[in-house]
Image (cartoon, rainbow, N blue to C red):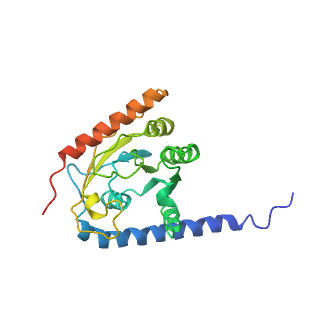
C-alpha cells in the first residue's frame, strides 16, 4: 500500500505544536510572575513544597478564579488543571485554557471522559490539579468535596496531595469585576495514597479525608499581612 503523502508532515506538526505550547505557556507564566507576585504577595507557607516524582493529583480548596495561576506560581512543576465548563466556556478564554492544557468537565460533576483523560495524564507522569469542591466558595468556607476526586484518584493510581489556598478570595472574589491587592498564602500537605476500594461510600470517604487534610493545612496558615 502506498504511504499517505501527509504522513511525513505529522511529526513536524507535532513538534511545532509542542514548541508553540512551551513558548506560550512560558510567556503566560512569566507575565503572571511579573504581575501577580507583587500584587498578591503570593507565597508558599510552611515546608518547601515538594511534590512526588511522577504522576500526582493535587486537591486545593477553591476561593477565586485566580487559584490556578496562583498555585502554579508556588510550584515548580507544570500543572494541568481540571476545570468546570463554566470557566472553560467564557468568551475569549477557550483558546487560553487550551494553551495551558486545561481539561473541561461538566458542571457539578466529573464528566466520565474528562476523568479518563485526567487519570491517563496522571498515570504517565503529569501533575493534575482538580478542585474537589466543584465550584468557587461564596463565603470563603471550604465546601464539601465531591466523591469524584476519590474516583479519579483510584483510577489514576497516583498519590494525592492536599493543598490549602488562603487570601485569593480577596484578590478576585466571585462576582468581582476588578482585581485587588491581597496576601495569598499556600500550604502543600503530605502525599496520600490513592484509594483501592471502589464503592460510592469509599470514594466519598476518601474525598472527606482529603478535605479534612486541607482544613488542617488551612488552620496552620498565618494571618494575612497588613
Q: Position of residue 111 (x, y in %)?
A: 54, 45
Name the residue located 42 percent from the left edge and 34 percent from the top edge. Answer: 194
In the picture, measured across the screen, residue 151 lies left or right of residue 216, that is right
In the picture, measured across the screen, residue 206 lies left or right of residue 116, that is left
Name the residue located 37 percent from the left edge and 60 percent from the top edge. Answer: 65
The quarter of the rendered structure image containing the C terminus is bottom left
Q: Position of residue 125 (x, y in %)?
A: 47, 48
Name the residue located 53 percent from the left edge and 63 percent from the top edge. Answer: 98
Q: In this rendering, does residue 193 appear at all?
A: no
- Furthest residue toward right: 1
Q: Position of residue 42 (x, y in %)?
A: 25, 62
- Residue 161, by quadrant, is top left
- Residue 178, by quadrant, is bottom left
In the picture, measured across the screen, residue 57 lies left or right of residue 139, that is right
Q: Is 162 placed above or below 75 here?
A: above
- Furthest residue toward left: 226
Q: Position of residue 74 (x, y in %)?
A: 30, 58
Name the residue located 51 percent from the left edge and 68 percent from the top edge. Answer: 91
Q: In this rendering, does residue 171 appear at all?
A: yes
- Residue 182, by quadrant, is bottom left
Amino acid at each position: 500500500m502506498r504511504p499517505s503523502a501527509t504522513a511525513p508532515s505529522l511529526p513536524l506538526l507535532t513538534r511545532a505544536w509542542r514548541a508553540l505550547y512551551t513558548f506560550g505557556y512560558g510567556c503566560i507564566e512569566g507575565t503572571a510572575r511579573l504581575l501577580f507576585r507583587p500584587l498578591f504577595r503570593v507565597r508558599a507557607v510552611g515546608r518547601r513544597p515538594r511534590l512526588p516524582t511522577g504522576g500526582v493529583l493535587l486537591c486545593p480548596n477553591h476561593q477565586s478564579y485566580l487559584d490556578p495561576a496562583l498555585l502554579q506560581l508556588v510550584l515548580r512543576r507544570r500543572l494541568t488543571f481540571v476545570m468546570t465548563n463554566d470557566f472553560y466556556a467564557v468568551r475569549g478564554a477557550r483558546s487560553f485554557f487550551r494553551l495551558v492544557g486545561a481539561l473541561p468537565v461538566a458542571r457539578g460533576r466529573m464528566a466520565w471522559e474528562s476523568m479518563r483523560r485526567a487519570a491517563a495524564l496522571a498515570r504517565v507522569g503529569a501533575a493534575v490539579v482538580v478542585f474537589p469542591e466543584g465550584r468557587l466558595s461564596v463565603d470563603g468556607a471550604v465546601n464539601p468535596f465531591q466523591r469524584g476526586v476519590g474516583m479519579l484518584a483510584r483510577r489514576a493510581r497516583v498519590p494525592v496531595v492536599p493543598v490549602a489556598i488562603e487570601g485569593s478570595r480577596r484578590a478576585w472574589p466571585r462576582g468581582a469585576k476588578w482585581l485587588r491587592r491581597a496576601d495569598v498564602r499556600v500550604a502543600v500537605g503530605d502525599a496520600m495514597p490513592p484509594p483501592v476500594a471502589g464503592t460510592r461510600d469509599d470514594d466519598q470517604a476518601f474525598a472527606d479525608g482529603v478535605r479534612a487534610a486541607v482544613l488542617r493545612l488551612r488552620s496552620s496558615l498565618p494571618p494575612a499581612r497588613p
